[in-house]
Structure formats: C-alpha cells, structure tokens
Image (tube, grey):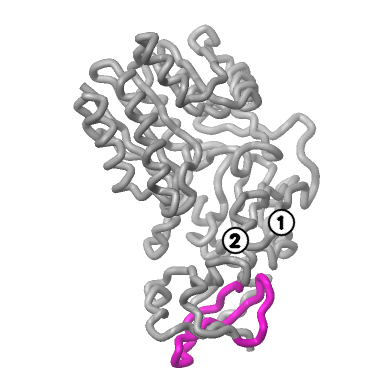
Amino acid sequence: MKQLILKPGREKSLARRHPWIFSGALARVQGDPGSGDIVAVRSNGGEFLAWAAYSPASQIRARVWSWDERERIGCDFLHARLLQAAAARERLLSAEVGDARRLVHGESDGLPGVIVDRYGDVVVLQLLSAGAERWRDELTECVRELTGCACVYERSDADVRELEGLPARSGVLHGALPTAGVQISEHGIRYGVDVVHGHKTGFYLDQRDNRKRVGELARDRDVLNCFCYTGGFTLNALAGGAKSVLSVDSSDGALALAQDNLRRNALDAGRAEWLEADVFKHLRTLRDQGKSFDLIVLDPPKFAPTAAFAEKAARGYKDINLLALKLLRSGGLLASFSCSGGVPADLFQKILAGAALDAGVQASIVGHFSAAADHPVLLSFPEGDYLKGLLLRCS
C-alpha cells in the first residue's frame, strides 16, 4: 500500500482537520507513490488518519481528500463533492446576484487544489495541485455533466503549479468559447470577462459583495479607484451616483476592457476618467498636485503569497495607504484591501494604523470586507482566508 508515516506527534494538525501535510512531518514514504497518487496517511503508531494526494515536488507533500477510511477516492467521490459544493451555492446566493459564481473553492469544499468558476454558460476549471491534476479528465467530465455548460475552459496557469512540479496548462476542454466573448451580469451590472488572459480565472468573483457596498457608498462623492483592473468598483460607483471616478491601472489592456464595460452599461462617461499609470507613483503625483477625494478604493494585486513575503508586503501596503489617507478629504472613506494570504487580518490592521499615524489623520474602522459567500473558509484551514479589507473613515 502507498502510504505516508508521520513522525511522532505530527498528527496533531490532522486531528484538527487541517488538510495539508508538510514534508517535515514525514517519517517515511512507503510504496513509491507518484505525483497525484492516493496515499493513506498514518500516525507513527500506524493509526489511519486520512486519504491524501501525494506531491513529491512540493513542501506541501500531501493534501487530504477524505478523513474516512471507508471512503474510496474516484469518480463517484469527485462527483459527490462537486454536487455538494454547487448545491451549497444555490442555497447561499440568490438569483439577483447574477450568472457568475464560484462553484468549487478548493480545500474549503473538500477538493484540494480544485477551483471551478462559472461565467454564464462558460465554466473555468483551475487545477492547482498534483492531486487535482491526477483527476483532470474525470473532473472535466464531472463539471460538464453537473453544469450542462456549453464550454469548459482550463486556466491551470497559476504560479503555484510550479511548486507542485506541474507545467502550466490552459485551453478549451469541452465545447467552444462564444464568438461574441464571455459576458456576465452581477447585481444588474454587465461585464465582459477575459477567461483566456484575465487575472485568476478571468474575473474577481470574490469581490462581488464589496463592489456592491462601494457603489452604495459612492453617491455624490468624488472617487479614486486604484488598481482598477476592468472597472468593477468604478462601474458600481458610477451606478451608485458618484460625482466623478478616476480609475488608475498600469495595464492598458485592462483599461480597454474597463471602458468596454462602461459602454456596455450605458453609464455616464463624462463622470469617468481612466488613467494608465503606476499607482505608487501616481498617488505621489496626485498628492503633489493637491488633489483630494471623498472615497478611495485600494485593491492591489497580491503582495505576499506566503508569510515569508510579509515584511516586504507590509512596506508596500503602508506606502499606498499612507498616500491614500493624505488624499482623503475630512470625513472621507478609504476602502483598503489585501488579497495576500501571507498577511493576516491583524497584521493588515496594524499596517493601516501605522499609515494613519504617519499621515497625521484620525481613522476609524466603520466596516470590514471579506470574500463573497461562494468563497467559504474552513475554520480548520485559516490559510483559505486570503481576502480581507477595512473601511476607514478619516478626520
């Protein structure tokens, strides 16, 4: 039997149902498992702990499929987990949310390394672990059967696959992408989604509720949206009645799609200004020009994928937040986000507190942001709680 035997005492995290087994916890490997193979995980005394997928190239040497020794990992298992995950979303998300949602969120849905996002009639499959890659064909077929979608597109091109010893993969797995492009609706706002080249699987579904909240706060305010990408916060602010929105991003391609989205929704283009620029530099330019705003959104890319990058990330977060706080008018609002898994919520709050102190402003937390309900976080897997945000009121 292919199995992993843990060092004495190293079964404690598994007893708390944490789904990752690190290389340093292993005493020995038996049966010569290959990448993605199913292995039995046992304590040093031989007690069964879990069924897991083996990854010889990764520091996360195995990821748990099931804690039940009687369970058999195969097509029926995968189909049941997919069905359970999709059904949970139906109970959590109302139809008015729109036609785009995350159907499977990796470890939190009991499918480590498996991401399934639905954009209307197109489903994007992302496989991020050796175990997920091992069942690629079966997962594709299960997703197709479960959703009845016209197209399954793979976006297994995230950097984390390198850590698993896996090559990047992308392309159509079933059907064909619509010739008119992929379009979705979210809270009444329409977006074009680039599932081929866009960030993540094409869109930031995790920010759905936060985009809506920013829109509700934007009425009669001058808004600055930094790292605007394809304009999600911008469109919601305009729809919410913002007086003006300046949107800044370093990608001309993202800005082009953002402006397409503006036209798609027939919003007042006269209230929207788009600027291709480095946000760090342009915040300084705005400061030097004496500009000010009533509402600023900071939604930067990931600065710290792991805790090892936290110190460097903290400097970046403090820099942009300090500059943003200096640009806020009295009584203004700052919606500041971090999607860095290596920066926990308490550290993020301390960073913003330091930025406010250095900016010479009095800031109060008036709201918290997190990922939408279709991005659940297992209590036993805090690493899944990557997106956090604070809404600050400044005086």
The residue depicted at 54 percent of the width and 67 percent of the height is 59
Q: Nearer the viewer, residue 209 or 312?
A: 312
Quadrant the N terminus occupies: bottom right
Label 2 belongs to which residue? 82
Q: For the residue carrying disc 1, how many other residues have a C-alpha within 10 Å: few (<14), some (14-19), or many (20+)? A: few
Q: Secondary structure at mark 1?
A: loop
Helix, strand or loop status at disc 2:
helix
Asked if residue 95 can be seen in this view, the reply is yes
Residue placed most toward the observer, 108 or 276: 276
> CA–CA distance between discs 1 and 2?
25 Å
Which portion, as a residue range, is magenta?
A: 30-54
Horizontally, residue 63 falls left or right of residue 326, namely right
Mark 1 belongs to which amino acid?
Answer: Pro
Residue density around tag 2, few if under 14, some if 14–19, many if 20 or more, within 10 Å: many
- Report the side of 388 relative to 134 (left or right): left
Say which of 75 and 233 sits in front.
233
Residue 340 vs residue 274: left or right?
A: left
Q: Is residue 270 magenta?
A: no
> Is residue 40 a member of the stretch shown in magenta?
yes
Q: Residue at the spot x=46%, y=47% of the render?
A: 304
Query: Residue at position x 55%, y 82% from top?
Result: 4
**Quadrant of image for the C terminus:** top left
Q: Which residue is mark 1?
A: 167
Residue 290 in percent (x, y) is at 35, 9
Residue type at mark 2: give it.
Leu
Q: Residue furthest bottom?
A: 45
Q: Please report the residue visible at 43 percent of the width from the left and 15 percent of the height from the top.
A: 285
Percent position of residue 66, x then y: 53, 74
Residue 135 lies, with reference to residue 206, above or below; the image says below
